[in-house]
Image: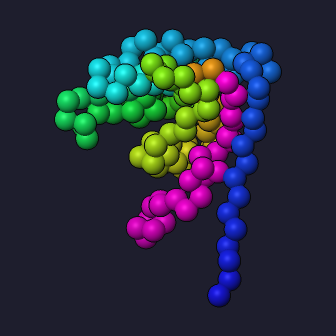
Amino acid sequence: MRKIILQSTITEYNKPSDLNIEDRHLLSEALKATGNSYSPYSKFKVGAAALLSNGEIVTGSNQENASYPIGICAERVTLSAISAVHPKQKIISIAITFKSNMKWASPVSPCGICRQTILEYEQRQKKNIRIILRGDGGKIQIIETIKDILPLYFDKSVLGK
């Protein structure tokens, strides 16, 4: 028997002014995107903003449904929009934040489905996607690749591809 230790690298900042101007702007755009959230059930408004290699920013927000399983997270809305409208552009960074009735200053990270989806985009573009996370205020976390928060990932290699 042997133990395998998995490690993740996350850089944490105390406030937006500690970030470079590009990351601050992207986080601001993600916060604006929460205004387009359709979340009448959870009241948890999530916004995402992605910076593309051509300098454009694409945003998305979570979209709920009374039949909960068919809602879609802000990250996947954003990634789908990029794929549909900017299919040749690489994603440099994606910022994710939220607004809620409850105050929660800790960054919220993507759910498992979104992590898997971001992984697929990293592999498609053969380039890591920086992830910028912030809660409703508080510290900001930057992750250089989704693999840091999805260490035992499932990809096409498992399918023999």
7 or 55, nearer to the observer:
7
Relative to 119, residue 25 above or below: above
Q: Position of residue 127 (x, y in %)?
A: 62, 43
Quadrant of the image containing the C terminus: bottom left
Quadrant of the image containing the N terminus: bottom right
Would you say 11 lies left or right of 153 here?
right
Q: Position of residue 131 (x, y in %)?
A: 62, 35
88 or 138, nearer to the observer:
138
Relative to 136, residue 12 above or below: below
Q: Position of residue 112 (x, y in %)?
A: 45, 48
Would you say 84 lies left or right of 14 here?
left
Q: Position of residue 103 (x, y in %)?
A: 54, 22
Which residue ends up furthest to the bottom in the rendered image?
A: 1
Which residue ends up furthest to the right in the rendered image?
A: 18
Q: Residue at x 67, y 24 (%)?
A: 138
Q: Residue at x 74, y 21 (%)?
A: 15
Location of residue 90 (image quadrant): top right
Q: Is 141 colored magenta in this rendering?
A: yes
148 or 89, nearer to the observer:
148
Give the mark count.
0
Would you say 85 lies left or right of 67 here?
right
Relative to 124, residue 86 above or below: above
Relative to 28, residue 123 above or below: below
Which residue ends up furthest to the left in the rendered image?
A: 67
Q: Is 127 colored magenta in this rendering?
A: no
Visible in this render: residue 124?
no
Residue range highlighted in magenta: 138-161
Q: Residue at x 69, y 17 (%)?
A: 24
Visible in this render: residue 43?
yes
> Which color scheme is applied?
rainbow
Location of residue 40 (image quadrant): top left
